[in-house]
Image (cartoon, grey):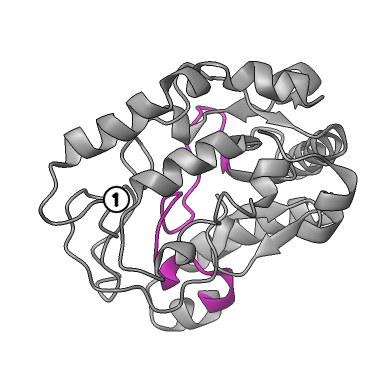
Amino acid sequence: MDLKKHHYLPVVICVLYIAGCATNDKQYAPISLISENTNPLSAKDSVLKKYESAIGSLEQSMINAGLVNIKEVDSSIVVQLKYSSTDNFMGTDVYGNLENCYLQKEVAAKLVLAQMLLKSKFPYYSLIVYDGARPRKVQQVMWDIVKVAPGEKTKYLSSPLFGSLHNFGAAVDLSIVDAEGREIDMGTKFDYFGELAYPEKEEQMLKEGRLSGKQVENRKLLRNCMIQAGFSPLETEWWHFNSCSRSTAAEQYQMIE
Protein backbone atom coordinates (compact mmCIF):
# COMPACT_ATOMS: atom_id res chain seq x y z
CA MET A 1 0.00 0.00 0.00
CA ASP A 2 1.12 3.53 -0.61
CA LEU A 3 -0.58 5.53 2.09
CA LYS A 4 1.15 8.71 3.00
CA LYS A 5 1.92 9.79 6.53
CA HIS A 6 -1.34 10.31 8.39
CA HIS A 7 -0.79 11.39 11.98
CA TYR A 8 -4.22 13.01 12.34
CA LEU A 9 -7.02 11.12 10.68
CA PRO A 10 -10.33 12.99 10.39
CA VAL A 11 -13.34 11.89 12.42
CA VAL A 12 -15.79 10.83 9.74
CA ILE A 13 -19.00 8.88 9.48
CA CYS A 14 -18.19 5.24 8.89
CA VAL A 15 -20.29 4.10 5.97
CA LEU A 16 -18.15 1.06 5.23
CA TYR A 17 -16.15 -0.80 7.85
CA ILE A 18 -12.47 -0.76 7.06
CA ALA A 19 -10.84 -4.14 7.50
CA GLY A 20 -8.32 -4.10 10.28
CA CYS A 21 -9.54 -1.13 12.35
CA ALA A 22 -9.25 -2.51 15.85
CA THR A 23 -11.27 -1.36 18.83
CA ASN A 24 -8.22 -0.71 20.98
CA ASP A 25 -7.14 2.26 18.85
CA LYS A 26 -10.31 4.28 19.29
CA GLN A 27 -8.85 7.68 18.51
CA TYR A 28 -8.82 6.65 14.85
CA ALA A 29 -12.08 6.12 13.02
CA PRO A 30 -12.35 4.14 9.78
CA ILE A 31 -12.40 6.43 6.77
CA SER A 32 -15.64 7.08 4.94
CA LEU A 33 -15.39 5.86 1.38
CA ILE A 34 -18.49 7.65 0.17
CA SER A 35 -20.62 10.57 1.22
CA GLU A 36 -23.29 10.19 3.89
CA ASN A 37 -26.13 10.53 1.38
CA THR A 38 -24.83 8.03 -1.15
CA ASN A 39 -25.75 4.37 -1.46
CA PRO A 40 -22.39 2.63 -0.82
CA LEU A 41 -22.97 -0.32 -3.13
CA SER A 42 -24.24 1.71 -6.06
CA ALA A 43 -21.41 4.24 -5.64
CA LYS A 44 -18.69 1.58 -5.74
CA ASP A 45 -20.40 -0.42 -8.47
CA SER A 46 -20.61 2.63 -10.70
CA VAL A 47 -16.90 3.33 -10.28
CA LEU A 48 -15.95 -0.29 -10.96
CA LYS A 49 -18.25 -0.46 -13.99
CA LYS A 50 -16.56 2.62 -15.42
CA TYR A 51 -13.18 0.87 -15.35
CA GLU A 52 -14.34 -2.70 -15.92
CA SER A 53 -12.52 -3.23 -19.21
CA ALA A 54 -9.31 -1.70 -17.86
CA ILE A 55 -9.32 -3.92 -14.78
CA GLY A 56 -9.70 -6.98 -16.97
CA SER A 57 -6.37 -6.31 -18.70
CA LEU A 58 -4.24 -5.69 -15.58
CA GLU A 59 -1.98 -8.72 -15.89
CA GLN A 60 -1.21 -8.06 -19.53
CA SER A 61 -0.35 -4.44 -18.70
CA MET A 62 2.30 -5.60 -16.25
CA ILE A 63 3.68 -8.27 -18.57
CA ASN A 64 3.94 -5.67 -21.33
CA ALA A 65 5.83 -3.40 -18.93
CA GLY A 66 8.49 -6.08 -18.47
CA LEU A 67 7.61 -6.96 -14.89
CA VAL A 68 8.10 -10.45 -13.50
CA ASN A 69 5.65 -12.76 -11.75
CA ILE A 70 6.87 -13.34 -8.18
CA LYS A 71 5.74 -16.98 -8.17
CA GLU A 72 7.86 -17.69 -11.25
CA VAL A 73 10.92 -16.23 -9.56
CA ASP A 74 10.44 -17.92 -6.18
CA SER A 75 7.52 -20.30 -5.79
CA SER A 76 8.04 -20.49 -2.01
CA ILE A 77 6.83 -16.91 -1.54
CA VAL A 78 3.12 -16.86 -0.73
CA VAL A 79 0.97 -14.43 -2.73
CA GLN A 80 -2.44 -13.27 -1.54
CA LEU A 81 -3.41 -10.05 -3.26
CA LYS A 82 -5.64 -8.12 -0.87
CA TYR A 83 -6.97 -5.84 -3.60
CA SER A 84 -8.13 -8.91 -5.51
CA SER A 85 -10.54 -9.52 -2.64
CA THR A 86 -12.81 -7.49 -0.39
CA ASP A 87 -10.42 -7.85 2.56
CA ASN A 88 -8.94 -4.35 2.23
CA PHE A 89 -9.58 -0.81 3.40
CA MET A 90 -12.10 -0.19 0.62
CA GLY A 91 -14.00 -3.44 1.16
CA THR A 92 -13.86 -3.77 -2.63
CA ASP A 93 -12.13 -6.02 -5.16
CA VAL A 94 -10.40 -3.65 -7.58
CA TYR A 95 -8.10 -6.22 -9.21
CA GLY A 96 -10.78 -8.44 -10.74
CA ASN A 97 -9.35 -11.86 -11.62
CA LEU A 98 -5.73 -10.89 -11.04
CA GLU A 99 -4.09 -13.44 -8.73
CA ASN A 100 -0.39 -13.03 -9.54
CA CYS A 101 1.89 -10.38 -8.09
CA TYR A 102 4.32 -8.56 -10.38
CA LEU A 103 7.41 -6.45 -9.62
CA GLN A 104 10.33 -4.95 -11.48
CA LYS A 105 13.07 -7.56 -12.00
CA GLU A 106 15.49 -5.85 -9.60
CA VAL A 107 12.79 -5.51 -6.97
CA ALA A 108 11.80 -9.16 -7.35
CA ALA A 109 15.45 -10.17 -6.88
CA LYS A 110 15.55 -8.24 -3.59
CA LEU A 111 12.36 -9.95 -2.46
CA VAL A 112 13.85 -13.38 -3.20
CA LEU A 113 16.86 -12.40 -1.08
CA ALA A 114 14.56 -11.31 1.76
CA GLN A 115 12.83 -14.69 1.60
CA MET A 116 16.19 -16.45 1.77
CA LEU A 117 17.22 -14.36 4.78
CA LEU A 118 13.95 -15.12 6.55
CA LYS A 119 14.19 -18.86 5.91
CA SER A 120 17.81 -18.94 7.03
CA LYS A 121 16.56 -17.86 10.47
CA PHE A 122 13.16 -19.57 10.49
CA PRO A 123 12.87 -22.28 7.80
CA TYR A 124 9.17 -22.79 8.57
CA TYR A 125 8.29 -19.12 7.93
CA SER A 126 7.56 -17.51 4.58
CA LEU A 127 6.91 -14.05 3.25
CA ILE A 128 3.32 -13.45 2.14
CA VAL A 129 2.82 -10.67 -0.40
CA TYR A 130 -0.36 -8.60 -0.23
CA ASP A 131 0.39 -6.14 -3.01
CA GLY A 132 3.12 -5.30 -5.48
CA ALA A 133 2.93 -3.53 -8.81
CA ARG A 134 -0.30 -1.63 -9.33
CA PRO A 135 -1.18 -0.08 -12.69
CA ARG A 136 -2.10 3.58 -12.56
CA LYS A 137 -5.60 2.82 -13.86
CA VAL A 138 -6.22 0.89 -10.63
CA GLN A 139 -4.83 3.81 -8.64
CA GLN A 140 -7.49 5.90 -10.38
CA VAL A 141 -10.21 3.41 -9.44
CA MET A 142 -9.13 3.52 -5.80
CA TRP A 143 -8.89 7.31 -5.92
CA ASP A 144 -12.45 7.54 -7.23
CA ILE A 145 -13.85 5.07 -4.69
CA VAL A 146 -12.41 6.82 -1.63
CA LYS A 147 -14.56 9.84 -0.83
CA VAL A 148 -13.36 11.96 2.08
CA ALA A 149 -13.23 15.64 2.93
CA PRO A 150 -11.33 17.90 0.49
CA GLY A 151 -7.61 17.78 1.15
CA GLU A 152 -7.80 14.55 3.18
CA LYS A 153 -7.58 11.98 0.39
CA THR A 154 -3.81 12.15 -0.01
CA LYS A 155 -3.47 10.97 3.60
CA TYR A 156 -4.69 7.59 2.36
CA LEU A 157 -3.63 7.37 -1.27
CA SER A 158 -1.13 8.87 -3.65
CA SER A 159 -2.79 10.79 -6.44
CA PRO A 160 -2.88 8.87 -9.75
CA LEU A 161 -1.69 12.09 -11.37
CA PHE A 162 1.74 11.63 -9.81
CA GLY A 163 1.56 7.94 -8.96
CA SER A 164 3.18 5.93 -6.19
CA LEU A 165 6.05 3.47 -6.07
CA HIS A 166 3.48 0.71 -6.44
CA ASN A 167 2.64 2.21 -9.84
CA PHE A 168 6.26 1.72 -10.87
CA GLY A 169 6.42 -1.85 -9.55
CA ALA A 170 8.98 -0.71 -6.98
CA ALA A 171 7.11 -1.24 -3.70
CA VAL A 172 5.69 -4.26 -1.94
CA ASP A 173 3.21 -4.82 0.90
CA LEU A 174 3.77 -8.02 2.83
CA SER A 175 3.90 -9.96 6.08
CA ILE A 176 5.08 -13.35 7.37
CA VAL A 177 3.17 -16.63 7.64
CA ASP A 178 4.01 -19.82 9.53
CA ALA A 179 4.14 -23.40 8.23
CA GLU A 180 0.34 -23.63 8.36
CA GLY A 181 -0.06 -20.45 6.33
CA ARG A 182 -1.20 -18.36 9.29
CA GLU A 183 0.06 -14.81 9.50
CA ILE A 184 2.21 -14.25 12.57
CA ASP A 185 0.91 -11.58 14.95
CA MET A 186 1.93 -8.09 13.85
CA GLY A 187 -0.39 -6.23 16.20
CA THR A 188 -2.72 -5.00 13.45
CA LYS A 189 -4.03 -6.24 10.15
CA PHE A 190 -2.72 -5.04 6.81
CA ASP A 191 -4.41 -1.78 5.79
CA TYR A 192 -4.91 -0.61 9.38
CA PHE A 193 -5.20 3.15 9.76
CA GLY A 194 -3.80 4.35 13.06
CA GLU A 195 -0.76 4.75 15.28
CA LEU A 196 -0.82 1.07 16.17
CA ALA A 197 0.49 0.32 12.66
CA TYR A 198 3.29 2.91 12.81
CA PRO A 199 6.81 1.45 13.17
CA GLU A 200 7.93 4.84 14.47
CA LYS A 201 5.43 4.52 17.35
CA GLU A 202 6.24 0.95 18.34
CA GLU A 203 8.23 1.75 21.46
CA GLN A 204 5.47 4.07 22.68
CA MET A 205 2.79 1.48 21.91
CA LEU A 206 4.87 -1.13 23.73
CA LYS A 207 5.18 1.05 26.83
CA GLU A 208 1.44 1.74 26.77
CA GLY A 209 0.66 -1.96 26.49
CA ARG A 210 -1.05 -1.58 23.12
CA LEU A 211 1.55 -3.76 21.40
CA SER A 212 3.17 -6.81 22.96
CA GLY A 213 6.86 -7.59 22.90
CA LYS A 214 6.22 -10.53 20.56
CA GLN A 215 4.28 -8.34 18.10
CA VAL A 216 7.13 -5.83 17.95
CA GLU A 217 9.63 -8.67 17.64
CA ASN A 218 7.69 -10.08 14.67
CA ARG A 219 7.64 -6.70 12.95
CA LYS A 220 11.37 -6.29 13.50
CA LEU A 221 12.00 -9.71 11.97
CA LEU A 222 10.15 -8.68 8.81
CA ARG A 223 11.81 -5.27 8.77
CA ASN A 224 15.33 -6.62 9.28
CA CYS A 225 14.99 -9.16 6.46
CA MET A 226 13.64 -6.53 4.09
CA ILE A 227 16.25 -3.91 4.99
CA GLN A 228 19.09 -6.42 4.60
CA ALA A 229 17.69 -7.27 1.16
CA GLY A 230 17.80 -3.61 0.12
CA PHE A 231 14.32 -2.30 0.89
CA SER A 232 13.38 0.77 2.93
CA PRO A 233 10.51 0.65 5.45
CA LEU A 234 7.73 3.20 5.81
CA GLU A 235 7.34 4.98 9.14
CA THR A 236 3.56 4.62 9.20
CA GLU A 237 2.92 1.14 7.76
CA TRP A 238 4.70 -1.94 9.08
CA TRP A 239 3.77 -3.89 5.91
CA HIS A 240 5.03 -1.44 3.26
CA PHE A 241 8.56 -1.46 1.83
CA ASN A 242 10.09 0.60 -0.99
CA SER A 243 12.85 -0.65 -3.24
CA CYS A 244 14.04 2.86 -4.10
CA SER A 245 13.03 6.51 -3.95
CA ARG A 246 10.28 7.91 -6.15
CA SER A 247 12.81 10.00 -8.12
CA THR A 248 14.97 6.93 -8.77
CA ALA A 249 11.93 4.93 -9.85
CA ALA A 250 10.93 7.69 -12.28
CA GLU A 251 14.44 7.66 -13.77
CA GLN A 252 14.75 3.89 -14.07
CA TYR A 253 11.22 2.71 -14.84
CA GLN A 254 8.11 3.64 -16.76
CA MET A 255 4.93 4.06 -14.80
CA ILE A 256 2.64 1.07 -15.37
CA GLU A 257 -0.49 2.30 -17.06
Q: Is residue 131 visible?
A: no
Q: Is residue 37 above or below residue 151?
A: above
Residue 75: image quadrant is: top right
Seen in the picture, residue 131 relative to 50 is either above or below; the reply is below
Identify the residue at horizontal 39%, vertical 45% (top origin).
Answer: 144
Residue nearest the viewer, comparing 79 with 98: 98
Residue drawn where x is 61% and y is 27% of the image: 78
Q: Is residue 177 magenta?
A: yes
Whole-percent x, y for residue 128 in the image = 59, 35
Q: Quadrant of residue 7?
A: bottom left
Q: Is residue 205 magenta?
A: no
Residue 200 can be seen, yes or no: yes
Position of 190 with respect to 79 (left or right) is: left
Quadrant in the picture for the C terminus: top right
Horizontal and vertical percent position of residue 68: 78, 24
Q: Viewer-proximal residue, 163 or 203?
A: 163
Residue at which label 1 appears: 18
Query: Residue 246: horizontal and vertical position, in percent?
Result: 76, 58
Residue positioned 37% across, 73% down in the render: 210
Question: Where is residue 152, by image quadrant?
Answer: bottom left
Rendered residue at 81%/55% (across/down):
244
In the depicted structure, whether residue 76 falls above or below residue 165: above
> Which residue is nearer to you in this view: 105 or 255?
255
Overall secondary structure of the magenta section: loop
* Residue 170 coordinates in the image, percent (x, y): 75, 45
Q: Residues within 10 Å of mark 1 (few under 14, many from 20)?
A: many
The magenta span reads 175-201
Tell me the kind of residue under disc 1.
Ile
